[in-house]
């Protein structure tokens, strides 16, 4: 691991030699121009007062092309998902599938989950249809929701209390449901459309259910007036308050919100589906563990992990990350807890280029403010995973700069379009208030595969224009370049500074 080197004040040729570490394949002049440009970017006035770390290496040899504060640990935000996804592929395997089962024992019907974030209401309906097709019509016992594959701790360490209502901070349960094919587990979509003028708006949910209570405090206003609709789940409850006004004849508004105790929503959807298919469970719905020897009645299997990686990484889905952490804990030590999962993550990272004892791992998604890793550690992982049999699958799950298809470009779909980085940079984004990251792969203009990691903390505003300029500069780099490339910052689509683009569904 190369130690950080101070570049300011060094002569250009000297800086290039210090950074190289190994004999340069290009000219010292070319390398010094890259150093000069990248040094200017990490010291951009927009980042004054921030702590910024950037390291660039050749992917094959590991030769350092640039290093600035690369070993200082920082909050990674969603760059944490690089570690989680790689370890999950190594521990669980690309073919890993989640199973949701219906079992019967002693007149009770059990719905057992293992963390599948891709289960939709339609899948619970299909399970109910299979129960009916098996000949089961009336059960004298209870419907028991079994979420014991994971523990009952729903929120991660260091997660902000005021993020609780938002779907990107949903509760983690082994028995859950998603409202869409982005697989936003543990959330529902609240749709608001105009009613009659002066009357309340019409509010509905996807999936339709009676578990979540809607408190409708809306009004339909005159055409052309402001749309002020707000949707927020009340703290610690299953009550969602919908307030504000929506103009008459305006387009519907859709908002995502987290669910209190997703296990309860899953069980409620399944009970309604059983009723639709003529299956009557006489007793109430409870939670509990499925007894050994229970008879399997129906089963649903998820897509393989290799396929799930696409919505997980492209759209930076926090809940997928946390489910994978607990799944790793369950696979390695039999405990579906964050502690067991993070221990399994740390153990596996030693074979992926990272000494976990020199990092702090608090969750799998990067939502926690307690995570601490360095750009150098991220780059070490980016290089180490290139030898893994699952690397191509993992690499293809990364967002691609400037590609508008959201399941290709992902969180980079609106960035670096029309530049040398577009369709070239495969990298993971990361965003929290005052935290930003961009780490991944880029091929230089003369065909050199490079890896880079940039983590910035403690800034006001956004670091993304600088990140984009760094990535574009690397895509333009040539070992034989004779003139310095432009280092102007690139515009980035305006999004709130405290959330990642993928968390704003319209962007």
Image: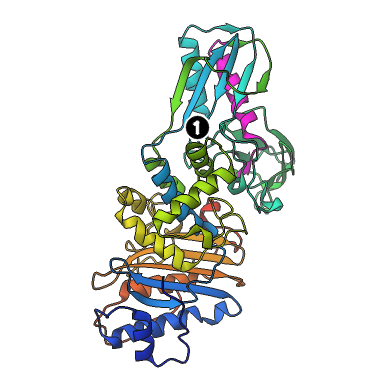
Residue in the picture at 39% in, 54% down: 351
In this figure, which colouring scheme has been used for the structure? rainbow
Above or below, 189 against 379 in this view is above
* Residue 482 in which image quadrant: bottom left
Residue in the picture at 53% in, 50% down: 364
The foreground one among 373 and 231 is: 373
Q: Residues within 10 Å of mark 1 (few under 14, many from 20)?
A: many
| Residue 296 inside the magenta-drawn segment | no
Q: Position of residue 456 (x, y in %)?
A: 54, 70
* Residue 381 located left or right of residue 69: left
The secondary structure type at the circle numbered 1 is loop
Residue in the picture at 65% in, 14% down: 142
- Count all numbered tags in the image, as a single digit: 1
User: In this view of the protein, can residue 268 be seen by the observer?
Assistant: yes
The foreground one among 89 and 299 is: 89
- Type of secondary structure dominating the magenta stretch: helix
| Residue 277 inside the magenta-drawn segment | yes
Q: Position of residue 338 (x, y in %)?
A: 58, 44
Q: Position of residue 452 (x, y in %)?
A: 40, 68
* Residue 150 in which image quadrant: top right
The foreground one among 294 and 254 is: 294
Which quadrant holds the N terminus? bottom left
Above or below, 11 against 138 in this view is below
The foreground one among 507 and 497 is: 497
The segment highlighted magenta reads 256-279
Above or below, 319 against 68 in this view is above
Above or below, 205 against 492 in this view is above
* Residue 451 located left or right of residue 270: left
Q: Position of residue 214 (x, y in %)?
A: 71, 35
Residue at label 1? 119
């Amino acid at each position: 691991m190369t130690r950080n080197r101070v570049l300011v004040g060094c002569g250009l040729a000297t800086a290039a030699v210090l950074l190289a570490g190994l004999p340069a394949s290009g000219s010292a002049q070319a390398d010094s121009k890259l150093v000069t440009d990248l040094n200017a970017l990490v010291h951009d006035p927009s980042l004054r007062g921030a702590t910024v770390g950037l390291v660039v290496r050749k992917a094959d040899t590991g030769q350092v092309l640039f290093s600035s504060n690369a070993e200082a640990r920082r909050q990674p935000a969603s760059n944490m998902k690089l570690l989680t996804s790689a370890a999950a592929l190594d521990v669980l395997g690309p073919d890993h599938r989640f199973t949701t089962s219906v079992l019967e024992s002693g007149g009770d019907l059990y719905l057992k989950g293992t963390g599948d974030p891709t289960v939709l209401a339609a899948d619970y309906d299909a399970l109910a249809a299979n129960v009916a097709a098996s000949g089961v019509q009336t059960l004298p016992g209870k419907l028991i929701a079994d979420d014991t594959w994971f523990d009952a701790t729903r929120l991660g360490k260091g997660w902000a209390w005021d993020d609780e209502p938002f779907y990107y901070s949903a509760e983690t349960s082994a028995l859950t449901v998603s409202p869409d094919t982005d697989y936003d587990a543990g959330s529902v979509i609240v749709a608001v459309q105009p009613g009659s003028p002066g009357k309340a708006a019409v509010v509905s949910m996807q999936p339709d259910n009676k578990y979540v209570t809607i408190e409708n405090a809306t009004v339909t206003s005159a055409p052309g007036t402001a749309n002020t609709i707000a949707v927020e789940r009340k703290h610690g409850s299953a009550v969602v308050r919908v307030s504000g006004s929506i103009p008459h004849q305006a387009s519907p508004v859709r908002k995502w919100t987290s669910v209190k105790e997703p296990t309860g929503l899953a069980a409620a959807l399944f009970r309604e589906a059983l009723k639709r298919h003529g299956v009557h469970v006489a007793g109430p719905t409870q939670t509990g563990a499925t007894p050994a020897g229970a008879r399997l009645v129906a089963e649903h299997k998820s897509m393989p992990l290799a396929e799930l990686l696409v919505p997980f990484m492209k759209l930076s889905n926090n809940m997928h990350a946390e489910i994978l952490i607990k799944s790793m804990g369950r696979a390695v030590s039999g405990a579906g807890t964050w502690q067991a999962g993070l221990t399994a993550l740390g153990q596996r990272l030693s074979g992926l280029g990272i000494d976990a004892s020199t990092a702090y791992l608090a969750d799998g998604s990067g939502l926690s403010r307690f995570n601490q890793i360095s750009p150098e550690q991220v780059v070490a992982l980016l290089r180490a995973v290139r030898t893994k049999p699952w690397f191509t699958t993992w690499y293809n799950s990364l967002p691609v700069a400037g590609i508008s298809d959201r399941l290709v470009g992902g969180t980079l779909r609106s960035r670096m379009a029309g530049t040398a980085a577009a369709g070239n940079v495969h990298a993971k984004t990361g965003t929290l208030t005052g935290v930003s990251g961009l780490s991944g792969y880029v091929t230089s203009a003369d065909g050199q595969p490079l890896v880079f990691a940039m983590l910035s903390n403690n800034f006001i505003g956004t670091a993304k224009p600088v990140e984009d300029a760094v990535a574009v500069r690397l895509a333009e780099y040539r070992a034989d370049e004779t003139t310095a490339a432009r280092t102007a910052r690139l515009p980035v689509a305006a999004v709130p500074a405290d959330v990642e683009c993928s968390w704003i569904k319209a962007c």
